[in-house]
Image (cartoon, rainbow, N blue to C red):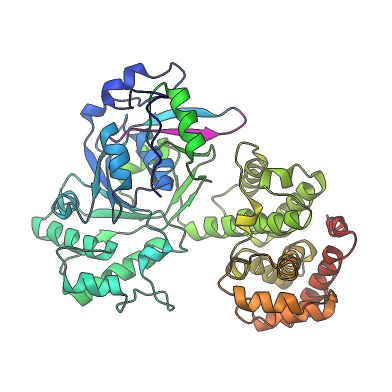
Amino acid sequence: MTPVTVHATMMRTRLSDATLGALAPDVARPAYDRAATRIGVVHFGPGAFFRAHPAWFFDRMLAADPGLAVSAVSLRSDAVREALQPQDGLYSLIEREAGPSIRVVGAVREVLTAPREPDAVLARLADPATRYVTLTITEKGYCLGPDGRLDLDHSDVTHDLARPAVPRTIYGWLAEGLERRHFDDAPTLTVLSCDNLSGNGQRLAAAVLRFCAAAGVEGAEARFPDTMVDSITPATDEPRRAEAARRLGLIDAWPIQRERFCQWVIGEGVPDADRAVFESAGITFTADVAAFERAKLRLLNGAHSTLAYVGLLLGHATVAQAMADAGLAAFVAAMMRDDIAPTLRAPDLDLAAYISAILARFANPAIKHKLSQIAWDGSQKLPIRLLPTIQAALAQGRDIRRPAAGVAAWMAFIRRQAHAGGEITDPLAADLSDLGRATTGDAQADVARFLALSAVFPADLAAAAPFRAAVEAAYAALCGPAPRSVMALQ
């Protein structure tokens, strides 16, 4: 995304180290001497989520450990560098709640664009003062094949194997950086993926080792803890830039915004000497990141999808609007507490408190999270967000009517979109459009058509009579004259 320039007629002075003293009084600012900080983190992919999440955590740590400032590296685009370099890496963060707050984040001390400055990037990676590499490169940036392993035939990977001095992928950069550190006897790096891949640290480690073996790289040693991250970060737009300028009293070329809730969970691998500093910033350490991932996928994402599909069928547009519907909010809350939570084992997580926090986040009127966006890619989301809950509940002999209603709502949503000629955003869009147009409103026949989608529904679940019956009952209600009757299941 290219930043939109704030018009000079609105404000003439730009945010920078030299102008920090001119900030409006209610703006929070770095609680440390930026000039005394040292770069100890190299981050790849400095988009909005990085600046709203990991950089914010490092900003909180710098008062206690000035060696955790960040060199932010863009793998391709110059946009972040052009926006932040004139601001000395400073930017503002608006936390969106009923009373939004604004602060200036100072953790980023350097912004590099990898293709333009490869030597500088490699020097940072090899620098003994660098202790961490963090990543927000999206799932696509990992170049994984269908088997979950690094795809050595991916065009960017083959490029890096052939031209290691000018890498395109994270693997090319890490391999060269780790090899240099090995020969210079530099301390072991800790590499933290902050992308939403299950087992992200283990998968990244395996991919790096596979790349290094193919490249003939020696001594590529690093720690790769699993992590989980969570915070809703809406895109920055021109009104947000104008708002930031008004509140700062200065121009910020690329302010960011997110909800106040911000979670970073890290597994084993962070050096013991740093744990106390990380924990003081609000980071959670656990021996079981997977338990946190399951809780997020089932409680937050599963409830989100249910809220989206039922909410759209009831005429709501955003998550906050759907949560303002008392019946729907009570339905989703009951599903989370009574149906999903009993299927989870998370000894390091207070599930009741986590559910309460999620419900408060959903109801936040300051976050305009569109239900239509959450509804995208349902064929990919249901198998990890809702179906595992249903399978676990069936195995435990528990009631599945509410989570099954979320599945039925997806089917009813596809039916409505297809018959109306509306857009279906999904990897299976063509098949779903054909299927949706073929539906007649007969619950038994329509549900059978959907359950035949083997890419979505495992054969054993599709054949389970209690599941079919629950989905058919909810589908009939949602497609009938009184769709709100589905919420009587609470």
Q: Position of residue 407 (x, y in %)?
A: 72, 67
Residue name at image x 26 percent, y 65 percent = 171
For residue 452, above or below residue 143 = below
Q: Is residue 85 left or right of residue 218?
A: right
In terms of depth relative to the viewer, which is nearer, 102 or 186? 102
On whether residue 97 falls in the magenta region, the answer is yes
Q: Is residue 338 visible?
A: no
Magenta stretch bounds:
88-98
Q: Position of residue 90 (x, y in %)?
A: 33, 33
For residue 427, above or below residue 403 = below
For residue 36, above or below residue 108 = above
In which quarter of the view is residue 48 placed? top left
In terms of depth relative to the viewer, which is nearer, 29 or 254? 254
In terms of depth relative to the viewer, which is nearer, 263 or 140? 140
In terms of depth relative to the viewer, which is nearer, 18 or 67? 18
Residue name at image x 24 percent, y 54 percent = 189
Residue name at image x 71 percent, y 59 percent = 309
Q: Position of residue 32 (x, y in %)?
A: 31, 25
